Every structure is written in structure tokens, then in C-alpha cells.
Amino acid sequence: MARVKGALVTRRRRKKVLKLAKGYWGAKSKHFKMAKEAVMKSGNYAYIGRKQKKRDFRRLWITRISSGCKANGINYSTFMNGLKKAGISLNRKMLSEIAIADAQGFTALVEKAKAAL
């Protein structure tokens, strides 16, 4: 059986990693060994970041809703409980948008939540 040389596959793999490491500081963008470690680490950070992004946005929405609730004399948890009992099912993202853009509409929601309690 003929001997197979793996230069083509190796070069492709290395080029792929170095392309991902483009723009990294120092030798991490030039040397394959360092670039490989940096790319693996950055991949882990990116994976974790995708999960944290969801948490961060939810925290932001809750903070905005809470701020709107305090302006109307009710706290966040009571407001959410009132909405649930009133049968109003709006997600936190939409509630935060309403709290920012339409203060009168949000006040109407607060009144409905208070009435349901």
C-alpha cells in the first residue's frame, strides 16, 4: 500500500485555526500552537456568553418593569401576580417596552393587575 502524506489536510486545518485567530494580540494570531489554544478558549467564552446574554436581558427587562411599577405605587412581584390573576399573558420583554414607550398603557396594565388582586 502506498504511503499517504497528510500535508494537505494539516495545512487546511492550520489555516482554518489561524483564520479564526485573526486579529488576536501578538503571537496568538501567527503561531499555530498558541492560536489553537486561544481559539479554543474564545470558543468557550462565546458559548458561555450566549447563555449569559439571555440572563442579562431578562434582568434588564425586570429592572425596567420594576421601575415602571414603582412609579405607579406597586412592586414588581405584586404586579406580575396581578397580571397572572387577571389573565394577561405578556412576556417581560414586551412589558418592558410598554413601560418605556407607553407610560399610560403601562399604568392601565397596573390598574388591571391591582383590580385582579
Image (spheres, rainbow, N blue to C red):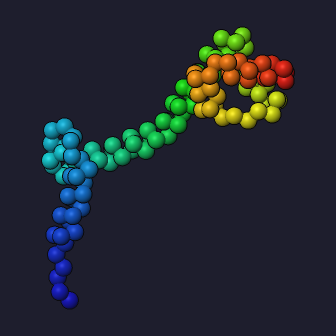
Query: Nearest the camera: 9 or 70?
Result: 70
Q: Residue at x 62, y 22 (%)?
A: 102
Q: Quadrant of the N terminus?
A: bottom left
Query: Nearest the camera: 92 or 49?
Result: 92
Q: Is residue 67 left or right of residue 87?
A: left
Q: Residue at x 18, y 45 (%)?
A: 29
Spot occupied by residue 67 in the image (x, y as percentages of width and height)? 61, 16
Q: Is residue 72 above or below residue 64?
A: above
Q: Is residue 17 above or below residue 115?
A: below
How many labels were placed on the picture? 0
Spot occupied by residue 25 in the image (x, y as percentages of width and height)? 19, 37
Considering every residue shown, the one lying at the far bottom of the view is 1
Q: Is residue 39 left or right of residue 84?
A: left
Q: Residue at x 58, y 23 (%)?
A: 101
Q: Is residue 22 above or below residue 8?
A: above
Spot occupied by residue 19 in the image (x, y as percentages of width and height)? 22, 52
Q: Is residue 83 left or right of residue 43?
A: right
Q: Residue at x 20, y 58 (%)?
A: 15
The answer to whether residue 69 of the structure is visible from this angle is yes
Spot occupied by residue 45 in the image (x, y as percentages of width and height)? 38, 40
Query: Nearest the camera: 19 or 60?
Result: 60
Instruction: Classify residue 84 by image quadrant.
Output: top right
Q: Quadrant of the C terminus?
A: top right
Q: Is residue 98 left or right of residue 19?
A: right
Query: Nearest the camera: 57 or 41?
Result: 57
Q: Is residue 10 above or below residue 50?
A: below
The answer to whether residue 78 of the structure is visible from this angle is no
Instruction: Classify residue 81 by image quadrant.
Output: top right
